[in-house]
């Protein structure tokens, strides 16, 4: 039996591979969906500030692979960086076109660069919200759902209080990505606090963590994935669960081995969520 269609894998997990190999690897591991990495300097399988022509080329590669896309996880720049708004907005518009061309129903965007000096955090959060709201109509016209990853331990919106502030300032149609590793790294229990945000969450990212460290292999951190998945299901969440194993210094010889280990761990704590790995 293949993996659950709810479960997806990000190409960020295989950021050391060229995109065609990453897509083939995700499919070979049994996933029915893929999340595409477009993170500047980390995973540019989709070039986050690429030209329309460059993005069209990547869209053809994605379509040729035949693996449905869950989302595009992108960092084209942030609206709390002074003077960057026009360039960031233009890059987002090109990424929305890419999503439409590649069949991605969602574009995931960041919640800002780390807090900038010289300006109150509340003002920076307002500028991030205003920037995201400014592209919401274009996203709707392209048939692409706009979503923001918050909280993010390493960025502006790095606490639950700031997350609530950002979400309150966003247009109702903009949803939230809930990355359990960022929640745990900030010292919170992602299972316990999920209900506070469940109504806006459209995607859940799965990676293990301890306070202050988001890069633990699954089962070697403090995230209780059984409680996380049971709580999400109880809250009515039926969206994608994305493995995003951006880890370092793991005991695994290959990323494929790490993914299989993660699937075994998830299968042990939530069999109905995972299905059966190949």
Image (tube, helix red, strand yellow):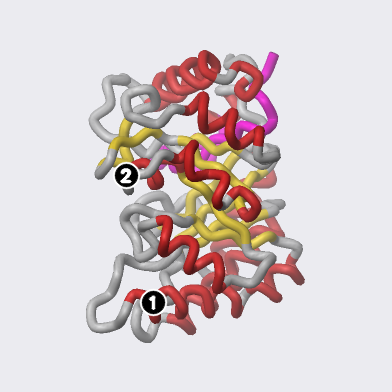
| Label total for image | 2
Look at the numbered disc 1 and give the secondary structure of its residue. helix
User: In the drawing, does residue 216 fall left or right of residue 202?
Assistant: left
Q: Position of residue 93 (x, y in %)?
A: 60, 73
The residue where tag 1 is placed is 122
Q: Position of residue 33 (x, y in %)?
A: 64, 36
Q: Quadrant of residue 34?
A: top right
Q: Position of residue 79 (x, y in %)?
A: 43, 76
- What residue is at 39 percent from the left and 62 percent from the top? 157
Return the residue nearer the eye: 242 or 173.
173
- What residue is at 46 percent from the left and 18 percent from the top? 265
Q: Which mark is residue 5?
A: none
Look at the numbered disc 2 and give the secondary structure of its residue. loop
- Indicate whether residue 113 is drawn in magenta: no
User: In the drawing, does residue 47 fall left or right of residue 231?
Assistant: left
- What residue is at 55 percent from the left and 73 percent from the top? 169
- What residue is at 37 percent from the left and 57 percent from the top? 159
Q: Count residues near mark 2 (Cα–Cα under 10 Å), then give few for <14, some for 14-19, many for 20+.
A: some
Q: Count residues near mark 1 (Cα–Cα under 10 Å), then give few for <14, some for 14-19, many for 20+.
A: some
Q: Is residue 61 visible?
A: no
The residue where tag 2 is placed is 187
- Indicate whether residue 6 is drawn in magenta: yes
């Amino acid at each position: 039996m293949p993996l659950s269609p709810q479960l997806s894998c990000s190409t960020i997990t295989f950021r050391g591979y060229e995109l065609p190999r990453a897509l083939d690897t995700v499919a070979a591991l049994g996933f029915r969906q893929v999340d595409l990495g477009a993170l500047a300097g980390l995973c540019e399988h989709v070039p986050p500030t690429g030209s329309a022509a460059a993005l069209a080329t990547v869209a053809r590669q994605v379509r040729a692979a035949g693996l449905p896309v869950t989302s595009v996880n992108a960092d084209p720049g942030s609206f709390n960086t002074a003077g960057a708004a026009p360039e960031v907005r233009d890059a987002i518009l090109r990424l929305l076109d890419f999503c439409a061309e590649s069949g991605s129903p969602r574009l995931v965007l960041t919640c800002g660069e780390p807090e900038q000096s010289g300006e109150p955090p509340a003002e920076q959060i307002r500028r991030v919200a205003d920037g995201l709201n400014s592209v919401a109509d274009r996203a709707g016209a392209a048939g692409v759902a706009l979503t923001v990853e918050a909280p993010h331990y390493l960025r502006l919106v790095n606490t639950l209080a700031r997350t609530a502030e950002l979400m309150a300032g966003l247009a109702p149609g903009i949803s939230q990505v809930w990355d359990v590793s960022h929640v745990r790294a900030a010292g919170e229990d992602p299972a316990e606090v999920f209900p506070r945000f469940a109504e806006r969450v459209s995607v859940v990212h799965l990676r293990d963590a301890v306070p202050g460290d988001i890069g633990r292999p699954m089962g070697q951190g403090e995230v209780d994935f059984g409680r996380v998945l049971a709580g999400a299901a109880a809250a009515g969440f039926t969206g994608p669960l994305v493995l995003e194993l951006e880890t370092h210094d793991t005991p695994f010889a290959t990323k494929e081995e790490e993914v299989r280990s993660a699937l075994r761990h998830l299968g042990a704590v939530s069999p109905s969520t995972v299905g059966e790995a190949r």
